[in-house]
C-alpha cells in the first residue's frame, strides 16, 4: 500500500482523500520562527502546547511529522498537517481516538493532547502556508514489519483487530461515511487505474477486479457495517517486547465500511513473505473470530476482499508514482504485494472460502450437508456401480479406506485417501448409479466426471478413475446417461476408484483423490465418503489429529468458557492408576483427579461397564437388579435415617435435586451457603455458589441466597492458635443469617455446605462447626445438606464420609465425582420424610440416572474401595504427605499453611502477614508440572495448591512429589 500518515507519525504520505481547507476559526495561529524546520517545530510545540524536548523528524509525503522526547521521558508526536487537509477528517480521527479512550477494555490507541488553549488542534503558518498542528501521545513498540509473523502472533493480531472493531461498533460521527479511495468498496473506481500496470501484473489485477464486480459487489450491502480502522498494514501494527501485538496506529483512514474489510486489509498485508499466503493468514482469521465471530456472509467474500486490497494497493501506488515519479517511497510496499498476488494466482476462490470457513469452525462447504442428506435420507436411491457377479480385483482386499492416512515418504506430508476402490478386475463394467449429466471426460487418463442434483437442486458430482480409456470414448460432456447404463469398464493397471464430490473447485477431472492429512477436515467436506453412494457402512477412517490440530479445533468448536490447565496444555491419551500419559508416552503423576477415585481405568470398573453395556442399558422405569442393589449398598454406608436414593449423572444435578427436595419439604426458598462455596454449574447451583456469582462474570448474590462466613482457621476472622472455640463462634455466622431472615418474616429451606470446602481452598472446618451450624438451621426449620461430591467415599481416610469428621448426620447427602470413577454417576440420599414431601404428583424421572451400566460401575467402585482397603490407604498416604509437607514448610517461608484429611490436602502459599501469594502459587504449579507432576491451585486468591489424587497413590509417588515440590519451591523463591 502507498504509505499514509500515521497517527503517531511513523508512516508518511497522506492518502488521496485526506485533503481539504483549514478552518482558521477553530485554531490558533503562530508565525514560523526563523531557522530550520526543527527550530520552527520546537518553537511551535513549546508555544502552543507547553512542551519542550528533542525533536526527531519522521517521514511524511505531505505532512510534517516529528517525535518529541521530553527531558522527563515522555514522548509525543507533533503532526503538522498539509495545508489542504480537511478539518472534518481530523475531527473524525480525534473523535475515534476519544471514543477508544473512553471504552473500558479497549485496545491502546494514541491520545490527543490538548493545546495550552484547551483545543485539539492549532493553526500554524509554515513555509508553504497554513498547517494544522496536532500532538498525540507516542505508543511504544516495534512495527509488525520488524518481527517474525508466527502463527501465534497472527492469531494475536486477529484478536487485536477484532477488539478495535468491537470498541468502535457503537461509534458514529457525521464524517464517517466519507468516500476514501482506500475503501474496499471503492474498488471499481480504482480498477480504472489497472492500465498503468505493466507486464503480467495487469492481467492478475484485472482478474481480481472482475471477481470483485461479479462476486463481492452484489453482496456488500447485506454485510454488517461499522466504522473500522481500515489500515492494519505492516507499519501500522505495533508489537511489544514480548512479541505480542500492542496497538494499531494511524487512524487516518477510519471510515464506515463493511466490518470484514478491516480484517481483509490486515490479512492482505499479513500475507506478505509467505510461500502459501492464504494458509499463513488462517490464524489471523481464527483469532479475529475468537473475539468477534465472523458471519458466513463475511467469510464468503473475505478472500476476494484480501486480494482486492492487494490489487488496489499496486494500482494506487502506480498512480501516485506516475504523478510523482521522483518519490520512490511511494513504491515501498509494492514488491511484497506483487509477490503475494502472483502466489495467489490460480487459487480457487471457492477452496479459499472453504479454508476460511474451516479455520473458524464452520463446515468448510456449507452445501456438503445437503449432499450427505440426499443419500442418508434415502432420497438418492443409487443403483450398483458393479454387476452382482463382477470379478473382483486381485488387490481388492488391500485397498485403502476412505479417510485413511498413508505413511509418508521422508520429507513429505502424510496424505489421506479421498476415494474408494471398486473391487473390479480388468474389463468389469462400471455403471451409472444416478440420474446424471456428463461434466467432463479425460479419456487419456480414464477419468469420467458426472454431475447430479439433490431434490432441492444442489449440485454434486461423482468421479471415476482408472477406467479403460477405450471404454469411455462414447461419453461426451452434456450427455445424460441413464441410471444403470454402462459408463465404461475397469482398466487393467489399478482397480477403478470413485469419489463423491460436493464441489469441483474449478479443477474438473483434475481434482485430487488424496489430500494432506492435516487438511482432512477441509477435503473430506469437498470429497465426501463414497460409502454414501456404495451403501457401505463403517468403511471410513476417522482423521487423527496431532496436538496442534486438536488445540485449533477446540478453539473453534468448543466454547472458550471452558479452560485448559497449564500454560502449555497437555494432550492426554491414556490413564493408569495414579498416572496420566500424554501423546508422546510421557507419564504424569496425577495429584488433581479425584474423579478417578480408585485409579485411572481400573480394570474391574472398566470390565463391569463393558459387561453390562454389552447386555442392556435402559432406565429406571423398568425393574432391574443392579440399581436396587447399588442403592442398598450406598444406604449401608450411611447413618440412619438416610435411606432413600435418587440417581443422577453429575454433582451439579445432585445438588440441584437436593435443592428441590429441600424446598418441597420446607415450603421455603431461602438458602444459606458458605462464602467461596461452589456447588455446581447449573443455574440453580451458580445461585448457591459465591465462588461463581461473586467472581468475574458473576451477577452477584441472588436475593434468596445468604452467605455465611467461611470458617477458615488460617486466614479467617478467627484463627487457630490465637482464638478459642472456633467451631462454635464461626457457626454464629449461620445464626446471624437466620436471624436476618426471621426479622424479614422468612425462614430457610436449607443450609448447603461441603463437608470440607474445596474451591474455597481445601478448608478443614474447626471442630464443632457443622454441629453448631446444623443445630441453628434445624431450629429455624431448614434442612442440612452435606455436599460430598469432592470428598466422599473414603477419601478423608479417618471416616468414610467427610461430614463424619464433624460428628453430624445431614438431612440430605449429595454424591458425585468418585462414584463412577470417571463414568457420569451421582446420587442424592435423604430421609424418608423428605423424600415423601417430594411426592407431589409430579413424576421425577432422569433418563440416564440409575441406568444398569452406571449402577454396575458404581458397584464395582464400592467393591474396589472395600476390597483394596483404599480408605485406610488414603489415611496412610495422607499422613505421609502431611509429614513431608510440614517438613517443607520449615524450609520454605512461602508455605503458610498445610492442612487436610487423608488424600484431600491443601498447601497455602503466603507472603508476610498471611497475604495470598497467588502468582507464586501459579509459578510453583508450573514448576511442579515441568518435573512431571500435576497439581492445581484454588482458593479465593488461587494461592492454595490442592492435592486430591486417585486413592491408589503409592508411597513412592508421595516421596517423588515431595522432592519435586521442594525443588519447585526453591526455584520460585530463587527467582524472586
Image: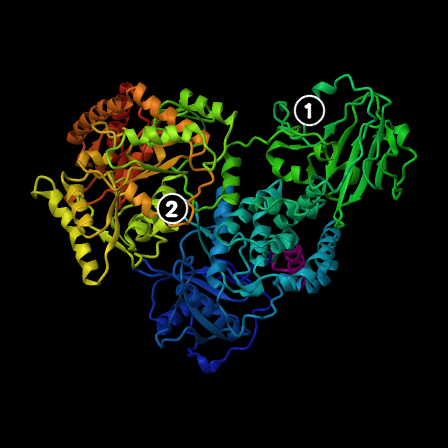
> Would you say residue 324 is visible in this rendering?
no
Could you tell which of marks 1 and 2 lies nearer the N-terminus? 1
Q: Please state the extent of the stretch shown in magenta in the rendering.
A: 308-328
Relative to residue 204, is residue 59 depicted above or below? Answer: below
The image's colour scheme reads rainbow
Q: Residue 49 placed where, x, y %?
A: 36, 71
User: Callout 1: 10 Å neighbours few (<14), some, many (20+)?
Assistant: some
Q: Residue 428 placed where, x, y %?
A: 85, 24
Corner quadrant of residue 791: top left
580 relative position to 754: left or right: right
Q: Which mark is on residue 681?
A: 2
Q: Quick check: marks 1 and 2 in contact, CB under 8 Å?
A: no
Q: Residue furthest top?
A: 394
113 relative position to 416: left or right: left
SS of the residue under disc 1: loop
User: Callout 2: 10 Å neighbours few (<14), some, many (20+)?
Assistant: some
- Judge depth for marks 1 and 2 and give the one in front: 2
Residue 11 within the segment the image draws in magenta: no
SS of the residue under disc 2: loop
Corner quadrant of residue 388: top right
Q: Residue furthest right?
A: 474
Corner quadrant of residue 527: top right
Q: Residue 569 placed where, x, y %?
A: 42, 35
Q: Nearer the viewer, residue 73 or 627?
A: 627
Residue drawn at x 43%, y 46% as measured from the top left: 843
Relative to residue 505, is residue 64 depicted above or below? Answer: below
Amino acid at each position: 500500500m502507498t504509505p499514509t500518515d500515521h497517527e503517531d507519525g511513523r508512516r508518511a504520505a497522506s492518502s488521496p482523500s485526506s485533503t481539504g481547507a483549514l478552518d482558521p476559526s477553530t485554531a490558533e495561529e503562530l508565525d514560523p520562527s526563523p531557522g530550520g524546520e526543527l527550530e520552527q517545530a520546537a518553537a511551535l510545540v513549546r508555544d502552543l502546547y507547553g512542551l519542550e524536548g528533542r525533536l526527531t523528524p519522521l517521514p511524511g509525503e505531505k505532512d510534517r511529522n516529528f517525535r518529541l522526547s521530553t527531558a522527563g521521558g515522555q514522548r509525543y508526536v507533533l503532526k503538522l498537517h498539509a495545508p489542504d487537509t480537511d478539518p472534518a477528517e481530523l475531527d473524525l480521527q480525534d473523535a475515534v481516538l476519544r471514543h477508544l479512550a473512553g471504552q473500558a477494555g479497549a485496545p491502546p490507541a494514541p491520545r490527543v493532547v490538548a493545546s495550552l488553549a484547551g483545543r485539539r488542534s492549532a493553526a500554524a503558518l509554515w513555509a508553504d502556508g497554513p498547517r494544522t498542528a496536532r500532538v498525540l501521545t507516542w505508543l511504544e513498540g516495534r512495527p509488525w514489519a520488524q518481527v517474525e509473523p508466527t502463527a501465534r502472533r497472527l492469531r494475536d493480531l486477529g484478536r487485536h483487530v477484532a477488539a478495535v472493531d468491537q470498541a468502535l461498533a457503537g461509534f458514529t460521527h457525521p464524517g464517517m461515511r466519507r468516500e476514501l479511495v482506500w475503501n474496499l468498496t471503492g474498488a471499481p473506481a480504482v480498477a480504472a487505474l489497472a492500465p498503468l500496470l505493466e507486464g503480467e501484473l495487469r492481467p492478475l489485477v484485472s482478474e481480481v477486479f472482475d471477481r470483485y464486480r461479479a462476486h463481492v459487489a452484489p453482496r456488500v450491502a447485506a454485510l454488517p457495517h461499522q466504522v473500522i480502522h481500515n489500515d492494519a498494514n505492516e507499519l501500522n501494527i505495533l508489537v511489544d517486547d514480548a512479541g505480542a501485538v500492542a496497538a494499531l496506529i494511524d487512524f487516518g483512514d477510519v471510515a464506515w465500511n463493511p466490518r470484514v474489510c478491516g480484517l481483509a486489509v490486515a490479512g492482505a498485508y499479513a500475507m506478505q513473505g509467505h510461500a502459501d499466503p492464504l494458509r499463513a493468514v488462517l490464524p489471523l482469521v481464527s483469532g479475529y473470530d475468537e473475539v468477534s465471530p465472523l458471519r458466513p456472509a463475511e467469510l464468503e467474500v473475505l478472500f476476494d476482499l484480501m486480494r482486492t486490497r492487494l490489487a488496489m494497493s499496486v494500482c494506487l501506488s502506480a498512480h501516485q508514482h506516475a504523478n510523482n515519479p521522483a518519490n520512490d517511497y511511494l513504491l515501498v510496499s509494492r514488491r511484497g504485494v506483487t509477490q503475494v498476488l502472483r502466489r495467489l494466482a490460480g487459487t480457487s476462490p471457492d477452496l479459499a472460502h472453504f479454508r476460511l470457513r474451516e479455520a473458524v469452525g464452520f463446515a468448510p462447504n456449507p452445501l456438503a450437508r445437503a449432499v450427505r442428506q440426499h443419500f442418508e435420507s434415502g432420497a438418492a436411491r443409487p443403483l450398483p456401480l458393479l454387476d452382482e457377479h463382477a470379478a473382483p480385483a486381485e488387490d481388492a482386499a488391500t485397498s485403502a479406506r476412505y479417510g485413511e492416512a498413508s505413511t509418508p515418504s521422508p520429507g513429505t506430508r502424510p496424505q489421506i485417501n479421498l476415494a474408494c476402490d471398486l473391487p473390479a478386475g480388468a474389463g468389469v463394467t462400471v455403471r451409472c448409479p444416478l440420474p446424471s449429466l456428463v461434466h467432463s471426460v479425460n479419456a487419456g487418463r480414464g477419468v469420467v466426471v458426472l454431475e447430479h442434483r439433490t431434490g432441492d437442486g444442489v449440485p454434486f458430482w461423482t468421479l471415476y478413475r482408472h477406467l479403460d480409456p477405450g471404454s469411455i470414448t462414447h461419453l461426451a460432456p452434456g450427455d445424460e446417461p441413464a441410471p444403470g447404463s454402462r459408463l465404461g469398464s475397469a482398466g487393467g493397471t489399478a482397480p477403478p476408484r470413485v469419489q463423491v464430490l460436493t464441489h469441483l473447485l474449478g479443477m474438473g477431472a483434475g481434482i485430487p483423490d488424496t489430500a494432506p492429512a492435516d487438511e482432512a477436515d477441509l477435503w473430506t467436506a469437498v470429497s465426501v465418503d463414497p460409502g454414501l453412494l456404495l451403501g457401505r457402512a463403517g468403511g471410513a477412517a476417522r482423521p487423527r489429529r496431532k496436538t496442534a490440530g486438536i488445540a485449533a479445533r477446540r478453539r473453534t468448536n468448543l466454547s472458550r468458557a471452558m479452560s485448559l490447565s497449564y500454560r502449555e496444555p497437555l494432550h492426554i491419551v491414556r490413564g493408569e492408576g495414579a498416572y496420566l500419559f500424554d501423546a508422546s508416552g510421557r507419564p504424569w503423576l496425577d495429584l488433581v483427579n479425584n474423579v478417578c477415585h480408585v485409579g485411572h481405568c481400573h480394570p474391574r470398573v472398566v470390565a463391569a461397564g463393558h459387561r453390562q453395556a454389552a447386555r442392556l442399558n435402559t432406565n429406571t422405569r423398568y425393574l432391574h437388579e443392579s440399581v436396587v442393589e447399588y442403592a442398598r449398598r450406598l444406604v449401608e454406608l450411611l447413618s440412619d435415617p438416610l435411606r432413600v436414593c435418587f440417581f443422577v449423572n453429575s454433582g451439579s444435578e445432585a445438588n440441584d435435586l437436593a435443592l428441590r427436595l429441600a424446598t418441597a419439604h420446607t415450603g421455603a426458598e431461602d438458602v444459606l451457603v458458605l462464602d467461596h462455596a461452589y456447588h455446581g454449574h447449573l443455574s440453580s447451583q451458580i445461585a448457591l455458589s459465591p465462588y461463581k456469582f461473586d467472581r468475574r462474570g458473576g451477577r452477584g448474590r441472588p436475593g434468596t441466597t445468604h452467605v455465611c462466613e467461611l470458617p477458615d482457621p488460617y486466614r479467617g476472622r478467627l484463627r487457630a492458635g490465637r482464638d478459642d472455640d472456633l467451631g462454635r463462634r464461626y457457626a454464629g455466622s449461620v445464626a446471624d443469617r437466620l436471624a436476618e431472615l426471621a426479622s424479614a418474616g422468612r425462614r430457610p429451606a436449607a443450609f448447603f455446605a461441603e463437608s470440607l470446602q474445596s474451591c474455597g481452598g481445601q478448608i478443614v472446618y474447626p471442630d464443632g462447626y457443622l454441629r453448631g451450624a446444623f443445630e441453628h438451621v434445624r431450629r429455624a426449620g431448614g434442612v442440612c445438606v452435606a455436599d460430598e461430591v469432592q470428598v466422599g467415599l473414603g477419601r478423608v481416610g479417618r471416616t468414610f464420609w467427610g461430614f463424619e469428621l464433624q460428628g453430624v448426620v445431614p438431612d440430605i447427602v449429595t454424591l458425585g465425582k468418585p462414584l463412577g470413577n470417571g463414568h457420569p454417576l451421582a446420587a442424592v440420599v435423604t430421609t424418608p420424610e423428605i423424600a415423601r414431601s417430594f411426592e407431589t404428583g409430579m413424576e421425577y424421572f432422569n433418563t440416564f440416572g440409575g441406568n444398569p451400566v452406571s449402577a454396575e460401575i458404581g458397584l464395582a467402585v464400592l467393591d474396589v474401595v472395600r476390597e483394596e482397603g483404599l480408605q485406610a490407604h488414603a489415611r496412610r498416604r495422607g499422613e505421609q504427605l502431611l509429614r513431608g509437607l510440614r517438613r517443607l514448610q520449615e524450609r520454605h517461608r512461602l508455605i503458610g499453611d498445610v492442612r487436610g484429611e487423608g488424600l484431600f490436602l491443601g498447601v497455602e502459599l503466603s507472603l508476610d502477614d498471611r497475604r495470598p501469594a497467588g502468582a507464586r502459587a501459579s509459578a510453583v504449579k508450573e514448576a511442579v508440572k515441568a518435573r512431571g507432576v500435576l497439581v492445581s491451585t484454588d482458593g479465593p486468591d488461587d494461592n492454595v495448591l490442592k492435592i486430591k489424587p486417585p486413592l491408589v497413590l503409592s508411597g513412592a509417588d508421595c516421596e517423588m512429589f515431595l522432592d519435586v515440590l521442594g525443588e519447585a519451591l526453591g526455584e520460585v523463591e530463587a527467582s524472586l
